[in-house]
């Protein structure tokens, strides 16, 4: 089901690219620079208001609502400092996943039209049209990858996408730079297929990295910082690298480097959580046999308990150290006060 999130994202890309393609086809460059660029923003404004309304009326998950009530009773809030202290591993994993996911997405869907026109000499409309067709083809592939993620594990599907991009990036960019329209389209489609591995699984993978109490904060911090630093800057960085090196293969090298780092993190930092309860949540049950299965294999269904135990142990140790520091500071203050009192008495 979470693959439908990226289907919505692709639909937005398609709508935006379609509008821009039509504008570049019907308007001259002067008209586009003068007033035509405002049209997509005018179309998007009411859609943005609808999105804001829907976001404001979304309901929280039962697990989050239960946790919120518990924390309200205990008057307890998780600080950003605590997130970095006790959840650094999932923060790093999330940042890297968001980095390679958005880097590949921005490269293919945002940067590639300008690469085709400015670097390879294709017409603006032709480049946009090629990307538009690729995005249409991606929609069913994304849904299929989401299904594979449920069957074989979202971690494995992402790893397949990473390995595929590491191996296929250079051949794909050779095809894109060939000048043959069929080969160009084939190269774009190869990249799109492996990007779809991320599109269909990452939306369900990211929330599974964090416990309920820090899920929103952890995702908000890492997602927005990583997208800003590595996603949004991708077109600018790639344009600069290509111009500075005069090498049209630089986007392939850049993408491969990100995917190598991503593969290391996915292999050693991320658990496969497909078909399992999220960290900190009890497994959902419908039938009596599922309850029996949970009771017979509690370690399998509450797979995150050992991780929580380690975090609680670290929290307890830190609290103990803080108490020791407070006691030592208090003793030092008392000692200073006693010396001052003795000095005053002697005088």
Image: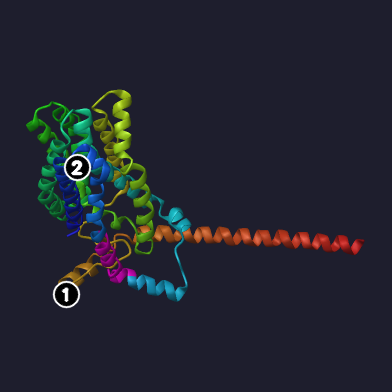
Q: Nearer the viewer, residue 15 or 220?
A: 15
Q: Nearer the viewer, residue 220 or 116?
A: 116
Residue for badge 2? 161
Task: Give neighbour class at mark 2: few <14, some 14-19, many 20+ (Cα, 10 Å).
Answer: many
- Residue 328, image x, y percentages: 66, 59
What color scheme is it?
rainbow
Residue 167: say if magenta: no
Residue for badge 1? 288
Task: Give left or right: position of 311 versus 319.
Answer: left
Label 2 or label 1, whichever comes before in sequence order: 2
Quadrant hosting residue 337: bottom right
**Residue at image x 10%, y 35%?**
185
- Residue 86, image x, y percentages: 43, 55
Most common SS among magenta residues: helix
Real-space Cα separation, disc 2 to disc 1, in angstroms: 38 Å
**Residue at image x 45%, y 66%?**
77
Q: Which residue reaches farthest bottom?
A: 73
Q: Which residues are magenta?
A: 48-64
Q: Nearer the viewer, residue 329 or 192?
A: 192
């Amino acid at each position: 089901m979470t693959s439908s999130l990226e289907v919505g994202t692709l639909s937005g890309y398609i709508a935006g690219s379609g509008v821009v393609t039509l504008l570049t086809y019907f308007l001259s460059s002067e008209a586009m620079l003068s007033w035509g660029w405002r049209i997509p923003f005018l179309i998007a404004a009411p859609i943005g208001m609808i999105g804001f309304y829907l976001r404001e009326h979304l309901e929280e998950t039962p697990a989050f609502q239960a946790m919120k009530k518990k924390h309200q009773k205990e008057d307890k809030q998780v600080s950003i400092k605590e997130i970095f202290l006790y959840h650094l591993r999932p923060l790093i994993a999330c940042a890297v996943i968001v980095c390679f996911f958005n880097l590949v997405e921005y490269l293919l869907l945002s940067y590639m039209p300008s690469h085709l026109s400015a670097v390879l000499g294709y017409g603006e409309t032709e480049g946009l049209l090629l990307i538009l067709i690729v995005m249409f083809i991606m929609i069913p592939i994304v849904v299929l990858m989401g299904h594979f993620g449920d069957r074989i594990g979202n971690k494995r599907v992402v790893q397949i996408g990473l390995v595929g991009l590491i191996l296929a990036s250079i051949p794909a960019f050779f095809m894109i730079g060939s000048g043959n329209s069929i080969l160009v389209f084939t190269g774009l489609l190869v990249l799109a297929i492996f990007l779809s591995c991320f599109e269909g699984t990452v939306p369900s993978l990211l929330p599974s990295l964090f416990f309920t109490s820090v899920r929103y904060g952890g995702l908000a911090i890492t997602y927005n910082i990583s997208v800003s630093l590595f996603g949004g800057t991708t077109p600018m960085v790639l344009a600069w690298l290509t111009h500075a090196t005069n090498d049209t293969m630089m986007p392939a090298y850049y993408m491969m480097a990100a995917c190598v780092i991503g593969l290391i993190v996915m292999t050693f930092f991320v658990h496969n959580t497909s078909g399992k309860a999220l960290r900190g949540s009890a497994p959902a049950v419908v039938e009596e046999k599922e309850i029996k299965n949970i009771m017979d294999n509690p370690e399998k269904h509450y797979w995150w308990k050992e991780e929580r135990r380690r975090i609680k142990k670290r929290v307890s140790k830190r609290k103990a150290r803080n108490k020791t520091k407070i006691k030592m500071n208090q003793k030092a203050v008392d000692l200073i006060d006693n010396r001052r009192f003795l000095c005053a008495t002697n005088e």
